[in-house]
Image: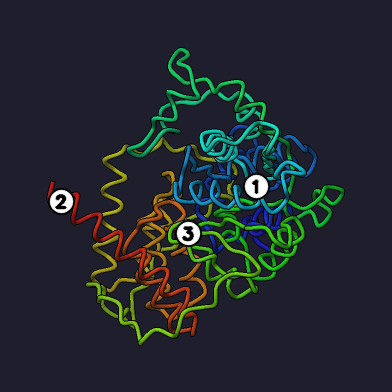
Amino acid sequence: MSSDQRFFDFLKERIGLDVTSVGPAIIERAVRQRSAASQAQTADEYWCTLQCSSDEQQALIEAVIVPETWFFRYPESFTTLAKLATRRLAELNNMRALRILSLPCSTGEEPYSIAMALLDAGFKPHQFKVDGMDVSPLSVEKARRALYGKNSFRGQDIAFRDRHFSAENDGYRLSAPVLEQVRLQVGNLLDPTLLASEPPFDFVFCRNLLIYFDLPTQKQVFEVLKRLTHVDGVLFIGPAEGSLLGRLGMRSIGIPQSFAFSRHGAPEPEPLPAFVPTPLPVPQPVRRVAPVPTQRRPFASVKQVSHPVAPSTSDAAALLANVAALANEGKSAEARAACDNYLRHHEPVAQVFYWLGLLSDVAGSVLEAQGFYRKALYLDPQHADALMHLAALLQSQGDTAGARRLQDRAARSERSADSERKR
């Protein structure tokens, strides 16, 4: 077993992370950072530190997790929630408060968005309660602080900020009425007994999590989600996860851009005609490519751990351009190595995972390609090329409903881009 594999297995066991969903470079980068922080000189030394310290175990998990969230991300989901919640309260004759769960809740933007959406829709505080849960204590603590910077407010409509926040130093403090609607706690969705003593929730938000798991873990997590969601409830997921839930027996409720599923949804649409994606300027890989020079792995027989200086933004752009050039020349092995190089030194971006998906796609690694495309869509939900190619893969597997949803999103993304260009 290699040194790297030990850390991959540790993260798989603790948080269910499938290394192929993010690529080994991101994990190696996190291990390198934590090794330097703990002053370990070798892989074995850091491994011993990791095994003996629960704090260090959590620190490595925190270094791997990439919270990418903001208030009212996927706004149609919150509009849909308000409509469904009104109907659900009527069905219950207002006999109890609605129960809503957000997990992973990250740094709090999603559960607080749920509370703001319902308060703005006219719900009274006693009519609903929101639970937020995350595997990361650091993220939960940030959520409890409820002080947010400008990066948490994106999109054109941020009028809610004036209603629910007050300016404080360089950030914005969330108001007490919203805070009081949300209970935050640490929890792991891999725990089969998670919230076992709690009644099921009317609405569950679990977005952009399943894409990080392999198929057995996805099924395991889905069983927990199914238990947590009321039989008449609705599960909100991420844009790239619809086909996964479709295969597990859930149905879309049929509201575009809501990414909402139930056990009793509308029937699936009729099969689509054969979908042919627009060809990209990436030729078939050359069968005999000169081998890429072997690069030293971060912990392969080294006495000292090197700490390179982080490359600049211009260097990141150059690396991305190099990936595109290598892929377009059919140099698949070199292009993949360039992607790994980028992820070792920079924060992940959608375009890198799109290229990894495309390279896997061309090589015939369908499941690996799907994972990379879904990761690209997590970072950029409107990435038109990733939408188009993932739709093509789903269509080839007979998932016409999933392909249709992605095609529609790709078309909307293209129309939006055309509109922006004409301004």
Residue under pointer 1 = 103
Which residue is pictured at 56% across the width and 43% down the height? 32
Where residue 260 appears, x then y in whole percent? 55, 59
Where residue 6 appears, x then y in whole percent? 69, 56
Discs 1, 2 touching: Cβ within 8 Å = no
Residue 220 falls in which quadrant of the image?
bottom right
Residue 373 falls in which quadrant of the image?
bottom left
Kind of residue at badge 1: Leu
Label 3 neighbourhood size at 10 Å, few (<14), some (14-19), many (20+)? many
Residue under pointer 3 = 239
Of the 4 image quadrants, the one containing the N terminus is bottom right
Task: Say if residue 365 shows up in the picture.
Answer: no
Where residue 213 appears, x then y in whole percent? 62, 62
In the rendered structure, find residue 421 and report the number of the disc placed on it.
2
Tell whether 305 sits left or right of 402. Answer: right
Location of residue 292 with respect to 61 vertically, above or below = below
Residue 311 falls in which quadrant of the image?
top left
- Disc with the residue nearer the chain's start (3 vs 1): 1
Kind of residue at badge 2: Arg
Q: Residue furthest left?
A: 422
